[in-house]
Image (tube, rainbow, N blue to C red):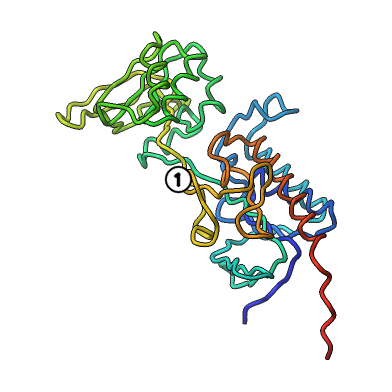
Amino acid sequence: MSDTRHTKVLIIGSGPAGYTAAIYAARAMLDPVLVQGIEPGGQLTTTTDVENWPGDINVQGPELMQRMEAHARETGTEIISDIITSLDLSKRPFTAMSDSGTTFTADAVILATGAQAKWLGLPSEEKYKGFGVSACATCDGFFYRGKEIVVIGGGNTAVEEALFLTNFATKVTLIHRRDSLRAEKILQDRLFKHPKIEVLWDHTVEEVLGTDTPPGVTGVRAKHVKTGKTTDVPCEGFFVAIGHAPATELVKDQLVLHNGGYVKVHPGTTETSVPGVFAAGDLTDHVYRQAVTSAGMGCMAALDAERFLSAQPVAEPVSA
């Protein structure tokens, strides 16, 4: 027999946005319940050195998320290791079903399920994640000062990351599978004019090359899409910039989305198209995608939820 539980605020997701929302919601005496999801801690748990979190000159990603979780627990959040498999936003209280069979009902919902970088799916790419393979130039570019870097992709993100990485690298090679870029023309002009950037057209990356002791990237093996000829491109950093996929499976048919599937919020708030449902972090942010901005939106979501709930009429007691 399944268990049914009610909470004022249900938080779905456990990255910087989810944990920060939990801290603020608990401090507002909303007794929040946070369901961690398939990857407790979010994307930062797959990151090693974090050097752009205010107050920490250097901190390990998993350690930072453990501290956030402990903080949320200490303030009074109930944290549950489970996965929300379905969510009904058609009426309040909202209803969520979990993988364990528990049914959650909630007066307000904060979505913080995040977004994940799209990867090539190569075994060698997985092997060197955190050891030379990255999907975030602003997060990890600093580590490649004075080194050669390869970026793969052809859209705005790839071109922007290639340009950003020239602040650190001696050379940036952009690999694209076609003979033209999808990026905006003004970005392309900057790319083509930059003396540190070289473009390798009509190529895909077949393998990431590297060492085992210590683990590190030494290059990538690129394959020409027409001739099949392979070329080894030396580098110490390989950045995958083929897009991000927001985790909107639970709400894609219930909330207004935009910009390729990100949850749309009212400007200056975390309010979604359904009153009482709020979204924070990478799920709604297709521009910045930083831990600190996600945390800020988590704070906003909790405050927005508090204001929403305080404006609701008090329920009359049900007679026997």
Residue plotted at (84% across, 51% down):
27
Observer-nearest residue: 176 or 285? 285
Q: Residue 269, position in %: x, y?
A: 68, 45
Please tell me in which quadrant of the rendered image residue 172 appears.
top left
Callout 1: helix, strand or loop?
loop
Residue plotted at (35% across, 18% down):
234
Number of labels in the image equals: 1
98 vs 32: above or below:
below
Q: Quadrant of the N terminus?
A: bottom right
To which residue does mark 1 refer?
260
Observer-nearest residue: 172 or 302? 302
Question: Going by the image, does 231 lie left or right of 198?
Answer: left
The amino acid beneath tag 1 is: Gly
208 vs 265: above or below:
above
- Residue at the bottom extreme, as displayed: 320
Q: Residue 254, position in %: x, y?
A: 53, 62
Observer-nearest residue: 81 or 117? 117
28 vs 231: above or below:
below
12 vs 55: above or below:
below
Label 1 crowd (10 A; few <14 / some 14-19 / many >=20):
few
Q: Residue 248, position in %: x, y?
A: 51, 54
Residue plotted at (57% across, 48% down):
264
Residue plotted at (63% across, 56% down):
12
Question: Going by the image, does 318 lie left or right of 64?
Answer: right
Please tell me in which quadrant of the rendered image residue 275 appears.
bottom right
Q: Residue 158, position in %: x, y?
A: 42, 28
Question: Going by the image, does 7 lie left or right of 259?
Answer: right
Q: Quadrant of the C terminus?
A: bottom right
- Residue at the top extreme, as displayed: 195
- Residue at the left extreme, as displayed: 227
Question: Going by the image, does 159 lie left or right of 78?
Answer: left
